[in-house]
Amino acid sequence: MLPVGRKPVVQYVVEELNRVGMNRLLFITGPGKTSIENHFDLNLELTQTLREDGKEELLSALSFERAQVQYFYTRQRQLLGLGHAVMCAEAYVGNQPFVVALGDSIIGKNTESRIVERMTNCFRENEAAAVIAFEEVPREDVFQYGIAKPKQKGEVFEVEDLVEKPTVEEAPSNLAVAARYVLAPSIFGALKQTKPGAGGEIQLTDAIRKLLQDGSKVYGVRLGASEKRYDIGNFGSYFRAFTEFALADEKFGPELREYLKELIDADPS
Ligand code: G1P
């Protein structure tokens, strides 16, 4: 629920998915995250008051509430990693493909990214078991990500192997898993056979690797130039994301720019 600019991060993710036609969303949250459910509730009283007061700008900020989205919620009762969180969705998903979007990453500044649409197309065209979004990261940062060994170059490529949080020496490339996945339901069987990996957690990357080893096809789709990934998972990248979004704000961006210049000029160290 951390805000970036005017909205909580999770709202950007919901808007991104809704824009490409995903309208049934299951949130898998940890303990104490009831604020997410409250945020996505319809607040009819507030909407009515804003309408009566002619507060159109604030009203449009609530338009996501009226989008045709059905929200579902479940809890990951033990924090055993991303793979374990995905397993919590099994009863909900059933026997159909689904999208996983990590709630700590915003893709593109104005939620205009259609990466998930390109990924679902790739999934269908190639009868893949998994399609993953990738971004290039500096070589020295590979230890923070799942890293691909691609079979070919290009925007869309087949994945030969995947490794979670490798050392710089081990990393087969600098193509990092970028927070969006399209998965076949066969992932659940693979997850059940997956032992804790990096960080002692059940890693989704390891389960996808199992699908590869069983002969299934896994594809990668690169984020486009306008689809920068904003990582909200640590303070450094969160501060950068907030600053960039705040500077892009139509109303307050220009004065923030001046303010930052003044601050830096006053203390250039
Ligand atoms: C997770 C995944 C990793 C991926 C990253 C960013 O790591 O396990 O493969 O590269 O998200 O999407 P985490 O950030 O939870 O450590």
Image (cartoon, rainbow, N blue to C red):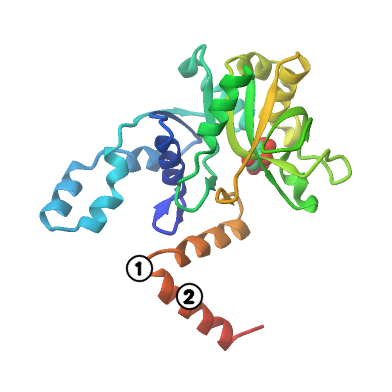
Instruction: Check the image and report above or below for 32 versus 186.
Output: below
Residue 202 seen anywhere in this rendered image of the structure: no
Residue 72: x %, y % from top left:
39, 27
Residue 122: x %, y % from top left:
59, 26
Q: Is residue 260 left or right of residue 208?
A: left
Q: Mark 1 or 2 closer to N-term?
A: 1
Q: Which residue is mark 1?
A: 251
Q: To which quarter of the image does residue 24 belong?
A: top left
* Residue at figure coordinates x 55%, y 45% from the top left: 105
Label 1 amino acid? Lys
The quadrant of the rendering that contains the C terminus is bottom right
- View quadrant of ligand 1: top right
- Could you classify mark 1 by the number of other residues whose Cα lies within 10 Å: few (under 14), some (14-19), or many (20 or more)? few
Q: Secondary structure at mark 1?
A: loop
Residue 208: x %, y % from top left:
69, 24
Q: Residue furthest left?
A: 52
Q: Is residue 246 left or right of residue 69?
A: right
Label 2 amino acid? Arg
Q: To which quarter of the image does residue 205 belong?
A: top right
Q: Is residue 211 left or right of residue 262?
A: right
Q: Secondary structure at mark 2?
A: helix
Q: Which residue is mark 2?
A: 257
- Could you classify mark 2 by the number of other residues whose Cα lies within 10 Å: few (under 14), some (14-19), or many (20 or more)? some
Residue 93 seen anywhere in this rendered image of the structure: yes
* Residue at figure coordinates x 40%, y 38% from the top left: 19
Instruction: Check the image and report above or below for 230 versus 85.
Output: below
